[in-house]
């Protein structure tokens, strides 16, 4: 009796890190097959990260192939859940990343994030298969000698791809087995009924719901023969004239066709090789053990007499529909969250143990509500250049410094999540600066969201910028003034006769994330300000450098002296990156 043996194989995870033998065994412990693959490296440009409402934008550099010039691609991650995303960091020269969404730390490989954001675009997600092997789980080969031998192959791949390449290890699971009593050939050759060998669970262990050893070996052989990877020495041909033991087992069961569906539904990687050139997320692999006469074939189909209708049922004649299902499927974010394997993180990467989330900051703010700061008006002290801005966790007054002892203006940063009162804190800070009589106040709104509050200031301010277009004009004028004053040299110590300029920017991160010019102007003003009589105060959600347009210099200059954190009891963690 003739028939077809069909397996479905699904990708569990693709790792982009170096493994030693034990770590490789742990990564593949629950899987049956693994690939070693390569692609030109992808790196995130750290300073390119921008936070927008419900969106993270970043740039990556990569190549189409090892000999091509490097290309820069701007990508973005979108979704309502990103409303509270923060603390984006990169590691190992941009090959690994992390950021937070609420209380969840998301982290993973830059390749996976780029493939996700491009919806598995071929130039971002394609990987060339270099090796196919059995995994180290209880259903794969697990003795120590085989582990060492396979790790030696991986180590050789690492050594031969030192520069310009990323090497990946992808773990696959054989998730199902089906048998049918039809195949692609019209006649029938003698063989045992399918059920006879089913009782011995030759092709699937039904009691434990997992593939048998023969199943893993057949799938491995089928994939090696299909991709013909350069690092595989054995099983690179499927030759019915020289059958393996597992092929003979198929013959005894009357199974003349093997169908392996590498299901790419919901995955990121597109696998290809020099033999299988189509870089698709799904592959449909067929090999047969036909009766005579048969065509000489090293892989694939060797039968000469093929039934059209039977081949159509098995998708042998037109596999495109099955492959396309993997192409149009939704890409799931299983690569970066809590469901992703912990072993994906390279040991050299030190992730932040804790970063305060918006929820934690707001909770901390609630703890401070019994320590009410009853604002009695500005209390600027000419002797110290300081004024009160709020109350600390210990109940004591928190003070900021408008000018140094030498009379130079001081910049400032106010940080806090939505609802923590950061705009009100900016109001208090501005009153402190203005009450000194040493500053002409300018106010800008980075997001255009506080127009009513801005209008309330109109009689007390020299310039109001309610949108980014006006803010650009304001900062351009400020830089012109700063460059003139810096050459003049007489504004290093401001006085009432030679007052300074205070530039306060609410929701500054929204302007920095969308305008490189505004970021540049503020960076230059943060440098020249102390010697040109100009102080800048910005309001941002947290201390991530992305909130400052990726400018480490600006963040450091603005936060040297006046740092105010709202909505959290212990703000020291948020200040570490300023120092």
Image (spheres, helix red, strand yellow):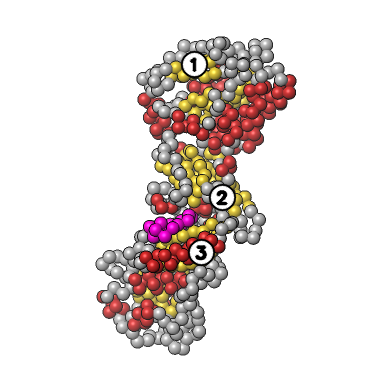
In this view, the residue in front, 169 or 152, is: 152
In the visual, does 103 lie left or right of 437?
A: left
- Above-or-below relation of 456 to 156: above
- At mark 2, the secondary structure is strand
Is 355 left or right of 480, judged from the image as shown?
Answer: left
Q: Give the residue at x 44% y 83%.
A: 242
- How packed mark 3 is, by other alpha carbons closer than 10 Å (few <14, some 14-19, many 20 or more), is few
Tell me the residue at 68%/27% (across/down).
479
Classify 10 Å Cα crowding around label 2: few (below 14), some (14-19), many (20 and above). Answer: many
| Neighbourhood count class around disc 1 (C-alpha, 10 Å): few under 14, some 14–19, many 20 upward | many
Residue 43 numbered tag:
2
Tag 3 secondary structure: helix
Judge whether residue 491 can be spotted in this image: yes
Separation of marks 2 and 1 at Cα, in angstroms: 45 Å
Q: Earlier in the sequence, mark 3 or mark 1?
A: 3
569 magenta-colored = no
Element at label 1: strand
Magenta span of residues = 9-26
- Please identify, in this view, whether the residue under mark 2 or under mark 3 is nearer the observer: 3
Task: From the image, state whether disc 3 or disc 1 is nearer to you.
Answer: 3
């Amino acid at each position: 009796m003739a028939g077809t043996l069909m397996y479905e194989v699904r990708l569990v995870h693709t790792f982009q890190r170096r493994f030693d033998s034990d770590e490789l065994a742990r990564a593949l412990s629950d899987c049956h097959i693994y690939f070693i693959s390569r692609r030109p490296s992808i790196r995130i440009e750290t300073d390119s990260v921008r936070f927008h409402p419900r969106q993270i934008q970043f740039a990556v550099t990569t190549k189409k192939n090892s000999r091509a010039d490097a290309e820069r691609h701007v990508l973005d991650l979108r979704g309502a859940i990103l409303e509270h995303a923060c603390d984006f960091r990169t590691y190992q020269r941009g090959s690994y990343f992390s950021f937070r969404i609420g209380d969840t730390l998301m982290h993973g490989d830059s390749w996976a994030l780029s493939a996700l954001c491009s919806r598995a675009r071929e130039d971002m997600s394609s990987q060339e298969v270099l090796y196919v092997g059995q995994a180290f789980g209880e259903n794969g080969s697990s003795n120590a000698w085989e582990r060492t031998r396979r790790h030696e192959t991986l180590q050789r791949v690492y050594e031969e791809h030192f520069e310009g390449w990323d090497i990946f290890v992808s773990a696959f699971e054989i998730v199902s087995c089906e048998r049918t009593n039809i195949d692609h050939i019209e006649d029938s050759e003698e063989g045992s009924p399918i059920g006879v060998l089913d009782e011995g669970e030759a092709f699937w262990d039904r009691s434990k719901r997992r593939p048998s050893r023969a199943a893993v070996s057949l799938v491995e052989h089928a994939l090696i023969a299909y991709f013909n990877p350069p690092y595989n020495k054995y099983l690179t041909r499927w030759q019915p004239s020289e059958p393996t033991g597992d092929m003979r087992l198929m013959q005894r069961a009357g199974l003349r066709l093997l169908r392996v569906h590498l299901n790419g539904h919901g995955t990121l990687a597109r696998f290809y090789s020099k033999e299988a050139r189509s870089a698709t997320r799904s592959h449909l692999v067929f090999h047969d053990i036909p009766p005579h006469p048969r065509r000489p074939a090293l892989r694939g189909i060797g039968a000469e007499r093929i039934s059209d209708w039977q081949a159509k049922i098995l998708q042998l004649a037109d596999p495109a529909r099955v492959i396309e299902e993997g192409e149009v499927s939704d890409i799931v974010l299983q690569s970066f969250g809590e469901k992703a394997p912990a072993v994906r993180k390279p040991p050299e990467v030190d992730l932040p143990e804790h970063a305060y989330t918006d929820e934690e900051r707001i909770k901390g703010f609630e703890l401070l509500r019994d320590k009410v700061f009853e604002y009695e008006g500005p209390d600027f002290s000419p002797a110290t250049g300081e004024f009160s801005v709020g109350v600390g966790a210990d109940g004591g007054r928190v003070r900021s410094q408008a000018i140094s002892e030498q009379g130079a203006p001081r910049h400032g940063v106010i940080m806090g999540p939505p609802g923590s009162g950061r705009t009100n804190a900016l109001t208090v800070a501005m009153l402190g600066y203005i009450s000194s009589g040493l500053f002409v106040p300018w106010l800008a709104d980075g997001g255009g969201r506080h127009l009513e509050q801005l209008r309330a200031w109109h009689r007390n301010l020299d310039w109001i910028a309610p949108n980014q277009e006006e803010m650009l004009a304001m900062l351009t004028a400020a830089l012109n003034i700063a460059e003139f004053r810096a050459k003049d040299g007489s504004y290093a110590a401001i006085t009432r006769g030679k007052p300074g300029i205070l530039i306060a920017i609410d929701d500054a991160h929204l302007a920095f994330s969308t305008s490189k010019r505004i970021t540049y102007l503020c960076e230059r003003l943060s440098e020249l300000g102390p010697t040109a009589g100009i102080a800048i105060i910005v309001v941002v959600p947290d201390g991530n450098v992305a909130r400052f347009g990726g400018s480490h210099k600006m963040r450091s200059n603005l936060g040297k002296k006046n740092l105010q954190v709202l909505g959290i009891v212990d703000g020291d963690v948020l200040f570490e990156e300023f120092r």
